[in-house]
Image (tube, rainbow, N blue to C red):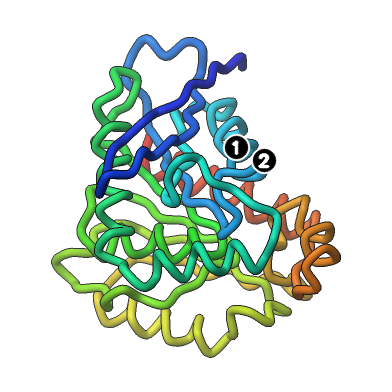
Amino acid sequence: MSIKTLELTSQADGVLLKSYVCLPNDSNNPKPAIMVAPEWWGVSDHPKTVTERLAKAGFVAVAMDVYGEGKLTTDAAKANEWMTQMLDNQDKLMARCQAILNDFCNMNEVDGDRLGVIGFCFGGKIALDMAREGMPVKAVATFHGNPAPKQPAKKDTFKAKVLIAHGEADSMVSMQAIEELKAELDNADVDYTLDVYKGAKHGFSNPNADERAKQNDVDLGYDEAAAKASWDKMIKFMQDSLI
């Protein structure tokens, strides 16, 4: 399927957010849509590729620029600094996500009633927090995501189904953190599925993970088998939830 790309600009707290949109070329009617919350690197090659793959699968997709001004980096120290700034003001972070959501759903090609979010690492937290905030998303998928809640999921607020893809050998997000997420979602009666990929490290879905690990001396690793299996499962989950 051929696709087209465009930049979606949004405004929040005086900052210009430059998100990356991909859509099928045949988007005459509104289509199910997926928002992509990137890793702490920003809207880099990986989230852009994700949105392109989603468009080829029939979705309209947007990689969200939560840092603003299209900032991105390959330096872990800089990425951590930017992420920490966002985590220090999570109301601001969620307001930026809400602004992007509003502008995305205002696109003629987007069916705002069939909206999902997928998140990677830091973006996994963003995706879950959007549902925890009660934003109108029907499905949330996380890949090696940070599960720490802005506030715990509440039964009447958290409406989305959830798919969690976690690496067994993830040294940045512990199995204990995943157990706490399960307890949180159970408590809120959330419909969720957890897949733990044997031997997979943090960042297992990102083909650039090995290079980033070497460059920054951090414990990341691409796992082709886990990446493919979790992607295929996510696509089916989104199709079942949104189409």
Q: Residue at x 44, y 28 (%)?
A: 60
**Residue sitting farthest toward the left:** 156
Q: Is residue 160 above or below residue 81?
A: above
Pinpoint residue 75: horizontal percent, then vertical percent. Answer: 69, 60
Q: Residue at x 40, y 28 (%)?
A: 8
Question: Gap in Å between the C-alphas at discs 1 and 2?
Answer: 5 Å
94, 194: nearer the viewer? 94
Relative placement, left or right, of 178 versus 109 is right
- Which quadrant of the rendered structure holds the N terminus? top right
Instruction: Verify CB contact (< 8 Å) between mark 1 and mark 2.
Output: yes
Q: Residue at x 61, y 14 (%)?
A: 2
Relative placement, left or right, of 229 versus 135 is right
For residue 85, which quarter of the picture? bottom left
Q: Would you name the residue on which mark 1 appears?
A: 48
Disc tally is 2
- Which quadrant of the rendered structure holds the C terminus? top left
As drawn, the label of residue 45 is 2
Pinpoint residue 24: horizontal percent, then vertical percent. Answer: 51, 18
80, 43: nearer the viewer? 80
Pinpoint residue 52: horizontal percent, then vertical percent. Answer: 59, 30
Mark 2 closeness class: few <14, some 14–19, many ≥20 residues within 10 Å: few
Q: Amino acid at mark 1?
A: Lys
241, 167: nearer the viewer? 167
Residue 126 can be seen, yes or no: yes
Q: Is residue 242 above or below residue 119?
A: above
Q: Secondary structure at mark 1?
A: helix
**Residue sitting farthest toward the bottom:** 176
Q: Is residue 220 above or below residue 5?
A: below
Pinpoint residue 145: horizontal percent, then vertical percent. Answer: 53, 67
